[in-house]
Image (cartoon, grey):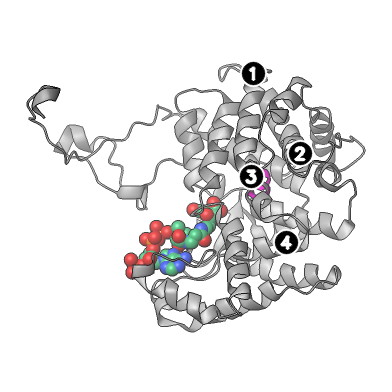
């Protein structure tokens, strides 16, 4: 239920105040439905559990961006267009060459996606350029992510191969091989990250897009927002924290107690969520998937044992229960990515690969909304209003 306050300032002479927009609806949307109390997540009305189990990520991209599940002919046509738009302009390799080897991959990804605007025309009022940018972004984000990864390891680039599937070709560009188990797990991971209604990065994409800016640059802004450790950057931080606990003699209770002690400023990464207040359905799916992937790949991971101990604490401990802090999507995704040999610093890039269709869908929805206007919130001013000028020699 919502109260429309868009005319409040004009009628009641007041604005609302809601820091962080925690209780403010910014739009009407049909992309993703989340019921935080019941732990329900649906893309365009389809249950995440069904999509994760039965769909390909390419089908989910089509569903999220074009508002319907594609039939065979539509999916084949879409697939063909993406395969034909996966090779990046040669000059972009020169831009990549200028980026330091140890740069954070999210900085590299944001730069490279925005750089696509220097090669391809875009006009938000020309639907053909919107569709072209959509296909190029979906095709080239894999190439740019894989090139950035291989450059950081001093390895030569492996170019896109139109013979491979959407996810398979990304893996091939990353590692030069496609392991079916890895492709299956990656497909599920990317589906689980495809959209999540008005999260920080989706809201950023709507905000930046509302000035009618260039879609390539708007997506670059989405990557930048996702990078933060309170948002998509949490998956990398989860792994770093679990490793810290293992290195500290597996003393996970020490870190649980630190998280409960406000004076430490320490937070258990991968726990808590602004919307889900009982469980994150994606974490539930990923928890069982983590066991399957590790078993299939014949891998043991002490981090997973620590993770399960932390989850058990979160379910039983009053501090966590009172604040409804339980594992979110980032908690288990990091462990699976590690099993798939995705390095920690690449994990938020993987989140970006998954979330790109959601960003595009959220952007398109706002650009086509009958209420479309540039985002420009108000403020409650708390500063000085009557300071007198003083020359520098008298200050
Ligand atoms: C994602 O929005 C989305 O949908 C995001 C996402 C998506 O798909 O786009 O779902 C993906 O970003 C998941 C979240 C990943 N981030 C983390 O795992 C980082 C750790 N989590 C927290 O920083 C926090 O829980 C947030 C950022 C997720 C939510 O922050 P809120 O809603 O602003 O909650 P809050 O900071 O106001 O905390 C409420 C209370 C506070 O204690 P009190 O002041 O009430 O006593 O809970 C405490 C916090 O101190 N708290 C934690 C905690 N998270 C919140 N205490 C310890 N460890 C934590 N992780």
Residue located beneath label 4 in the image: 338
Return the disc, 1 or 2, that comes first in the chain's sequence.
1
The reply to whether residue 316 is visible in this rendering is: yes
Residue extending farthest front: 393
Marks 1 and 2 in Cβ contact (< 8 Å): no
Q: Name the mark on residue 118.
A: 1
* Cα–Cα span, label 4 and label 3: 17 Å
- Element carrying mark 4: helix
Question: Of tags 4 and 3, which is closer to the observer?
Answer: 4
* Cα–Cα span, label 1 and label 3: 21 Å
Return the disc, 4 or 3, that comes first in the chain's sequence.
4
Measuring 77% from the left and 22% from the top, which residue is drawn there? 89
* Quadrant in which the C terminus appears: top left
Q: x, y (%) of residue 291?
A: 75, 73
Return the disc, 4 or 2, that comes first in the chain's sequence.
2
Q: x, y (%) of residue 242?
A: 60, 69
Q: x, y (%) of residue 82?
A: 79, 32
**Magenta span:** 350-354
| 378, above or below 292, in the image | above
Residue extending farthest bottom: 316
Measuring 79% from the left and 31% from the top, which residue is drawn there? 86
Residue located beneath label 2 in the image: 151
Residue located beneath label 3 in the image: 352
Q: x, y (%) of residue 76?
A: 85, 36
């Amino acid at each position: 239920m919502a109260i429309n306050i868009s005319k409040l300032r004009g009628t009641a002479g007041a604005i609302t105040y809601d820091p962080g927009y925690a209780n403010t609806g910014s739009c009407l949307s049909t992309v993703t439905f989340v019921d935080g109390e019941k732990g329900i997540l649906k893309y365009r009305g389809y249950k995440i559990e069904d999509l994760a189990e039965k769909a390909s990520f390419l089908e989910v991209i089509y569903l999220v961006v074009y508002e319907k599940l594609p039939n065979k002919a539509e999916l084949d046509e879409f697939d063909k267009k993406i395969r034909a738009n996966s090779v990046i302009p040669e000059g972009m390799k020169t831009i990549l060459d200028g980026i330091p080897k140890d740069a954070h991959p999210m900085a590299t990804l944001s730069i490279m996606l925005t750089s696509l605007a220097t090669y391809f025309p875009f006009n938000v009022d020309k639907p053909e350029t919107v569709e072209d940018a959509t296909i190029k972004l979906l095709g080239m984000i894999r190439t740019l992510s894989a090139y950035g990864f291989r450059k950081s390891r001093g390895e030569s680039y492996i170019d896109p191969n139109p013979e491979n599937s959407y996810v398979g070709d990304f893996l091939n560009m990353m590692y030069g091989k496609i392991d079916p188990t890895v492709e299956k797990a990656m497909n599920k991971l990317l589906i689980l990250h495809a959209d999540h209604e008005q999260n920080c990065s989706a809201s950023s994409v709507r905000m930046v897009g509302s000035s009618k800016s260039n879609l390539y640059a708007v997506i670059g802004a989405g990557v930048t927002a996702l990078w933060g450790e309170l948002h998509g950057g949490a998956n990398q931080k989860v792994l770093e924290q679990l490793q810290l606990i293992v290195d500290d003699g597996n003393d996970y209770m020490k870190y649980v107690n630190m998280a409960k002690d406000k004076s430490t400023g320490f937070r258990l990464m991968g726990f808590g969520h602004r919307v889900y207040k009982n469980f994150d359905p994606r974490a539930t799916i990923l928890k069982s998937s983590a066991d399957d992937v590790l078993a299939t790949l014949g891998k043991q991971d002490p981090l997973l044992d620590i993770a399960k101990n932390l989850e058990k604490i979160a379910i039983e401990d009053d501090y966590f229960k009172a604040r409804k802090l339980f594992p979110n999507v980032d908690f288990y995704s990091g462990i699976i990515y590690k099993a798939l040999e995705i390095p920690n610093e690449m994990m938020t890039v993987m989140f970006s690969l998954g979330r790109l269709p959601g960003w595009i869908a959220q952007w398109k929805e706002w650009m086509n909304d009958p209420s479309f206007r540039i985002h420009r919130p108000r403020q409650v001013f708390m500063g000085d209003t009557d300071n007198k000028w003083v020359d520098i020699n008298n200050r």
